[in-house]
Amino acid sequence: MTEQVGSRRAFLTAGSLAGATAALAASSVVATPGSALAQEAGGSLKAIRDRGELRIGVAPGEPWFYKDQRSGEWYGLGWGLGVAVAKELGVKPVPVETTWGNAVAALQAGQFDVMFTMDATPQRALAVDFPVQPMFWYAQGVLLADGVSVTSWEEMNKPEFRIGVVLGTSPDRDITVRLPKATIERFPSADETGAAFIAGRMDGVSLFHPALVMLQSRLKRGKVILPQPLRESPSSAAVPNVADKSWRDWLGVCLGYFYATGQTQKIFEDYLAFRGIDPAATPAIMRERWKS
């Protein structure tokens, strides 16, 4: 893998980050739970095992899902967890391509069995189902420009601090409340936010920290921090909302076990290493490892 790329190439190839941002910002499709289509497709644990396949929704957006265009193989935290879950079930993991914006509707239609790294929100829970156990945790972070040194949100809360966010995302809403005195620049996409950062227009960019790590690795500049006090959020896995809850409940037990035993963290670190990023220099997705 090529280690050095120009900043323009880094910015252009950051497009997959937009998918990760969309995962946080995409609106939910609300419909009656337990749709007939999902029921017919088989949303139970028995149906998956009888089929011999675990159909996993995949959508470009690092570090959750990444498709190697040469081999056609999928990588990333979401895909890696899917492979591990399929192994526990004794079935074959099968990728089903979708988009972040369409994933909820696709689950309702029974097109696949699970979409990993989809946050559980009240709106989405009207249409699809989520295990009780969180899959992993991430924190709202800031990619600081070279030469900028802050450690807390309060240090950024001043007019001279310029911070970029993607319009309409959770970080945008949080920053608006958390940093009322800062100069907040809002951009339609992560690409445009990254371009402004490269141009020196921003002192920092705020996204959830795994996405920021991928952005920093592409831009080859800046430092990712988790400002104090921590603003943390759990991620989850969405499944069809059907009457038989055996698949949802078993998946929750499995994800809880993977998290507690460190397997989820290892899958994340393996992917970082695959993409040439030092896991030791990257904030964990286990909140117990964050400095308070």
Image: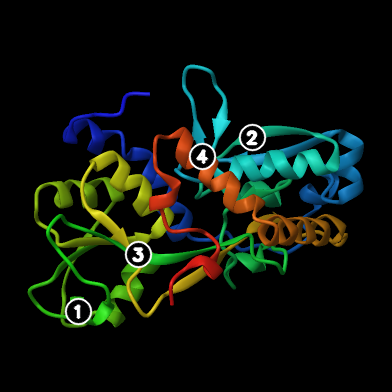
Tell me: 194 left or right of 81: left
Residue density around tag 4, few if under 14, some if 14–19, many if 20 or more, within 10 Å:
many
- Tally the numbered discs: 4
Residue beneath disc 4: 271
Q: Which mark is residue 96?
A: 2
Instruction: Give me the C-alpha separation between circle 2 and circle 3.
Output: 31 Å
Residue drawn at x 54%, y 40% as measured from the top left? 270
Q: Which mark is residue 141?
A: 3
Instruction: Give me the C-alpha separation between circle 4 and circle 3.
Output: 20 Å
Does any portion of residue 219 appear in the rendered image?
A: yes
Residue drawn at x 9%, y 52% as measured from the top left? 200
- The amino acid at mark 4 is Tyr
Secondary-structure class at tag 3: strand
Counting residues from the start of the chain, the first of labels 2 and 1 encountered is: 2
Tell me: 128 left or right of 102: right
Is the N terminus in the top left, top right, bottom left or bottom right quadrant? top left
- The amino acid at mark 1 is Glu
Counting residues from the start of the chain, the first of labels 4 and 3 encountered is: 3
Residue density around tag 2, few if under 14, some if 14–19, many if 20 or more, within 10 Å:
some
Residue beneath disc 1: 155
Q: Position of residue 208 (x, y in %)?
A: 40, 61
Q: Is residue 197 above or below residue 54?
A: below
Counting residues from the start of the chain, the first of labels 2 and 4 encountered is: 2
Secondary-structure class at tag 2: strand
- The amino acid at mark 3 is Gly
Counting residues from the start of the chain, the first of labels 1 and 4 encountered is: 1
Residue drawn at x 64%, y 35% as measured from the top left? 96
Q: Position of residue 175 (x, y in %)?
A: 29, 74
Secondary-structure class at tag 4: helix
- The amino acid at mark 2 is Val
